[in-house]
Amino acid sequence: MLEVKEPAETGISIAEAARRTGVSVHTLRYYERAGLVVTTVDRTAGNRRRYRQLDLDWIKVCTRLRATGMPIRTIRRYAELVSAGRGNEKDRLELLESHRAEVLAKLAELQDNLELIDHKIDVYRGRLHAGTADLLWAPAEPSEPAG
């Protein structure tokens, strides 16, 4: 699965882990408290966190899933399945396939929205080039109050 590149006893500090993963120290601590990390993060004799490559790789997975709109509770469920080990691969697959379908639907909606924006840009460019921008739609002036 995820390759461990650094021995657990060396690891890196939380500040360095934050820098390498692109998330804040606060977010790293939150991920641990929220049950999103699949391993127990090592600690020094002074109780300071020491992150291994495995931890960094997993945090990147979490941030990517979160960036695609996966709810924290779903990431937590996925982390629980991964932490539980072998035997639940079908559940993991179903979870990821379900999320993929949601992401594809969002992408389709964004594509539709982008097409509308592109159309509006084309209209404005064409009208400005033709010198007819003043003919573009604008809200009507408010009428005089009745009275």
Image: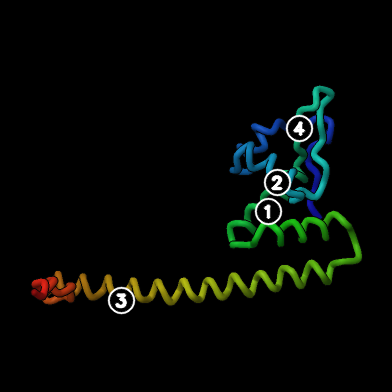
Q: Residue furthest right?
A: 87
Q: Nearer the viewer, mark 2 or mark 4?
A: 2
Q: Which mark is drawn over residue 62?
A: 1
Q: Which residue is mark 4?
A: 49
Q: Where does the image place residue 123, in percent across and percent down from the top left?
A: 23, 75
Secondary structure beneath dot 2 equals helix
Q: Quadrant of the N terminus?
A: bottom right
Q: Where does the image place residue 100, in percent across and percent down from the top left?
A: 65, 71
Q: Which residue is mark 2?
A: 31
Could you give the CA–CA distance between mark 4 and mark 3, rounded to whole angstroms?
52 Å
Kind of residue indicated by mark 4? Arg
Secondary structure beneath dot 4 equals strand
Mark 2 near mark 4, Cβ–Cβ under 8 Å? no
Density class for disc 2 (Cα within 10 Å; few <14, some 14-19, many ≥20) is: some
Q: Is residue 7 above or below residue 134?
A: above
Q: Quadrant of the C terminus?
A: bottom left
Secondary structure beneath dot 3 equals helix
Could you give the CA–CA distance between mark 4 and mark 1, rounded to whole angstroms?
19 Å
Mark 1 near mark 2, Cβ–Cβ under 8 Å? yes
